[in-house]
């Protein structure tokens, strides 16, 4: 019945209705980029109304596709944990200028994101976090000397900077009331500390000498323990000899030598085992892999004498008479001939 009553109106104004629908469709297609907003994963949105009190201070808009009027705005914030590196020049307690590199981890809070957008804006890292952290770091580091900051108190200074920074974000300030936290400051890392080159070298040398002193102390402890060990070992040896007695001491020493020789004989290096001729003589090891058969004592003695004679014969060279005739001694015939010639000459003279 209702559709039957509406049908005459529709038939009468069909052209106007079709034209209106087409205009609205074209207008929606034209304005859809400003009306449909997608908030990516891990992000939050803050809505701003042009005709209704401006920024929405309520909870942030979650991720997904959202519709808005073309004249309103929807601002996108990254809600993931983010890390920022920043360099600061600070002055230590002893008046040295130190270059530090500080990294901090932060997140925006969904419940107070609207207030953060209204009071600070999207550039809150540059406008709030970096200046506040620089002021806190300079205040904390000024209580430490360069040596303390460089060597032993680095982690302590890092923890104090973090706690002081969290306290600054909780306090009443120009961008948030007291007790309202706009940014969650999760972690802070003091990555590097760069001292003047001469100061750093002096501190490193001092630390090196201190570690060397600890090394010597440890060596002294080792030597003390070694002294105790040797003392206990000497007491054990003395007790052993007391139990053996002087009568069996030689037999025990001979047995110890045989056992040591057997241990050496089992090794992989080359050796020759030579057994002593007497009962008290211990075996000896000489470098060779094989054991040559022993020869009878008489043959061994003759072979040793032959080797000695050969060596002596090699060392002695044969005697050679000098070739110069002027240096030779005259024989007996030559002497008699010279005497005969001398007698004839004397006779001629007479």
Image: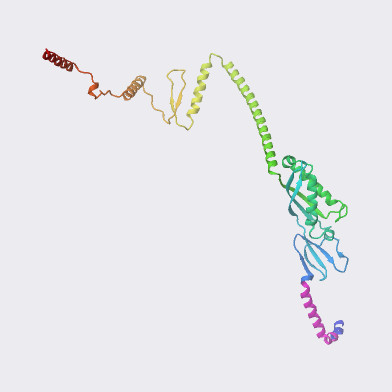
* Residue 223 versus residue 84 in the image, above or below: above
Q: Position of residue 238 (x, y in %)?
A: 59, 18
Colouring style: rainbow
Direction front: furthest residue: 350
* Labels in figure, total: 0
Residue drawn at 63 percent across, 22 percent down:
231
Direction top: furthest residue: 350
Residue drawn at 57 percent across, 17 percent down:
241
Q: Position of residue 199 (x, y in %)?
A: 70, 41
Q: Position of residue 318 (x, y in %)?
A: 28, 24
The segment highlighted magenta reads: 8-32
Q: Position of residue 326 (x, y in %)?
A: 23, 22
Question: In the picture, which quadrant includes the C terminus?
Answer: top left
* Residue 318 versus residue 192 in the image, above or below: above
Residue 224 highlighted magenta (yes or no):
no
Residue 14 highlighted magenta (yes or no):
yes
Looking at this view, is 93 or 49 the one in front? 93
* Residue 10 versus residue 252 in the image, above or below: below
Residue drawn at 79 percent across, 75 percent down:
28
Residue drawn at 77 percent across, 75 percent down:
30
Looking at this view, is 180 or 26 the one in front? 180
Find residue 119 and report its image quarter. bottom right
Find residue 79 and report its image quarter. bottom right
Find residue 3 and report its image quarter. bottom right
Looking at this view, is 153 or 95 the one in front? 95
Question: In the picture, which quadrant includes the N terminus?
Answer: bottom right
Q: Give the overall secondary structure of the magenta segment.
A: helix
Name the side, left or right, on which 254 lies relative to 345. Answer: right
């Amino acid at each position: 019945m209702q559709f039957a009553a509406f049908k005459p109106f529709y038939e009468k104004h069909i052209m106007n209705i079709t034209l209106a629908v087409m205009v609205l469709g074209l207008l929606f297609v034209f304005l859809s980029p400003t009306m449909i907003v997608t908030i990516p994963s891990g992000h939050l949105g803050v809505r701003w109304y042009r005709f209704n009190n401006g920024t929405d201070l309520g909870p942030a808009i979650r991720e997904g596709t959202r519709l808005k009027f073309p004249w309103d705005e929807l601002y996108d914030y990254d809600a993931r944990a983010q890390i920022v590196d920043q360099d600061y020049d600070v002055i230590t307690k002893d008046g040295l200028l130190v270059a530090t590199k500080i990294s901090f981890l932060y997140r925006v809070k969904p419940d107070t994101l609207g207030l953060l957008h209204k009071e600070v804006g999207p550039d809150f890292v540059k406008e709030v976090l970096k200046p506040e952290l620089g002021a806190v770091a300079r205040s904390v580091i000024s209580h430490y000397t360069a040596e303390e900051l460089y060597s032993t108190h680095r982690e302590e200074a890092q923890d104090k900077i973090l706690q002081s920074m969290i306290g600054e974000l909780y306090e009443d300030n120009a961008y948030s009331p007291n007790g309202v936290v706009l940014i969650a400051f999760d972690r802070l890392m003091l990555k590097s500390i760069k001292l003047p080159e001469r100061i750093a070298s002096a501190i490193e040398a001092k630390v090196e000498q201190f570690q060397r002193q600890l090394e010597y102390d440890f060596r002294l402890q080792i030597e003390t323990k070694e002294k105790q060990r040797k003392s206990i070992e000497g007491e054990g040896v003395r007790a052993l000899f007391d139990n053996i007695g002087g009568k069996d001491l030689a037999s025990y020493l001979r047995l110890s030598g045989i056992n040591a020789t057997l241990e050496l004989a089992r090794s992989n290096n080359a050796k020759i085992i030579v057994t002593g001729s007497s009962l008290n003589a211990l075996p000896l090891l000489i470098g060779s892999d094989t054991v040559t058969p022993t020869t009878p004592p008489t043959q061994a003695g003759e072979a040793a004498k032959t080797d000695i004679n050969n060596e002596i014969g090699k060392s002695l060279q044969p005697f050679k008479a000098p070739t110069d005739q002027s240096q030779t001694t005259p024989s007996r015939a030559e002497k008699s001939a010279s005497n005969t010639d001398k007698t004839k000459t004397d006779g001629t003279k007479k």
